[in-house]
Image (spheres, rainbow, N blue to C red):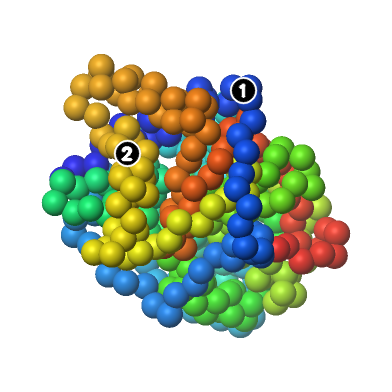
Amino acid sequence: MRVGCHRELLLLLLLLVVGMPASLAGSQPQQQRTWPVPYRRFDYRPKTDPYCQARYTFCPTGCPIPVMKNEDVIEVYRLQAPVWEFKYGDLLGHLNIMHDAVGFKSSLTGKNYTMEWYELFQLGNCTFPHLRPDVDAPFWCNQGAACFYEGIDDVHWKENGTLVLVTAISGTMFNQMAKWVQYDNETGIYYETWTVRASPDKHAVVWFESYECSKFILRTYQKLADLGAIFNKIQTNYTTITLFTGEPIYLGNETSIFGPLGNKTVAAAIRDFYYPFKPPQSVEEFFLNVLKIVDQIVLNHQFYLFYNLDYWLLPVKSPYIKITYEEIPLPNEDNTRLGL
């Protein structure tokens, strides 16, 4: 099975089309929960299923993180460029849909390195599942992972994005960071596209936090700060894709919904919701699916979220979906620890 770009285009159209005003949707009372739902970490990273295939190979030039000499001085660079720039140029940069990474330069060897965290099987497959005719439960190819490789592509990051020095660290600090990256990468394994909030208000309840490239970079900066790095005073903005909803309704996990004793009504509703997100077979089907998606989200006020291997029903409400590009200060700037 080859995974094309159709799902990325569906996601992009969803972001552009659904952000329209409409009436609000209500929510149902539930048991008291702690919000946001904590992102779940695991004891180890499972092997990927061969059913999951990437159109673009994950981390094709990746290499082990080197051990630096303790006396080395490592420059750390903030890297940011439009998502899918290799395919669409600066198109998504105009929408502030950006990808983040971090660069390192050794003063002793002169070598440069890039580190980033992204989807193993492209963004569309992390956001929407596959529906297989012989399996009731949706099938997810939603792992994300860290990628470390030698070199910094100056043109890629500078032309439509950012390449700027943010701090300098010792070789000892770099080696400590490398151990943390291994732990973080082995325990935080599933990509989460959506931030989910009660409203656009700055102080609104956050129901779910996303877990994607920018969050990895923010965690890396915070780890370096914890190790003693002092960051330069520069403005740093990040992309967030947010769904707006009333209080989420917990539905269950794969077994409780799709298993032998599962809820067939809920199972059918989830499959029906995700059906229009499948790769279309024609242009006509593509645009028909877009209309179905808008109908489900805007008119029916429903969005089914898969988070921590659980399913949730979101009673979505206006403005439904919003892309923001907001400042998150570097560590040390306000002497507060980032909640990541």
Q: Is residue 326 above or below residue 120?
A: above
Marks 2 and 1, Cα distance to the nearest angstrom? Answer: 23 Å
Quadrant in the rendering for residue 147: bottom left
- Residue located at (70% from left, 56% from top): 166
- Looking at the rendered structure, the kind of residue marked 2 is Asp
State the residue at coordinates (24%, 46%): 131
Q: Are marks 2 and 1 in contact (CB under 8 Å)?
A: no
Q: Which quarter of the rendered picture does the C terminus lie within?
A: bottom right
Task: Examine the rendering and report whether any part of residue 269 can be seen.
Answer: yes
- Quarter of the figure with residue 337: bottom right
Is residue 116 placed above or below 89 in the rendered structure?
Answer: below
Question: Reading the chain from its start, which is encountered first: label 2 or label 1?
Answer: 1
- Write down the quadrant of residue 324 in the picture: top right
Task: Give the labeled residue for mark 1.
Answer: 22
Q: Nearer the viewer, residue 73 or 287?
A: 287
In the rendered image, the quadrant that contains the N terminus is top left
Instruction: Name the spot of residue 312 as percent of width and height, x first.
Output: 48, 52
Q: Is residue 264 left or right of residue 197?
A: left
Camera-nearest residue between 282 and 333: 282
* Type of the residue with mark 1: Ala
Element type at marker 1? loop
Q: Which one is in front, 288 or 6? A: 288
User: Residue 124, position in %: x, y?
Assistant: 37, 42
Location of residue 324 with respect to 288 vertically, above or below: below
SS class, disc 2: helix
The image's mark for residue 272 is 2
Query: From where the camera sits, is residue 274 visible?
Result: no
| Residue 303 picture location, percent across and down | 48, 40
Please identify the residue farthest to the top as the structure is shown.
284
Q: Going by the picture, which residue comes out furthest to the right? A: 334
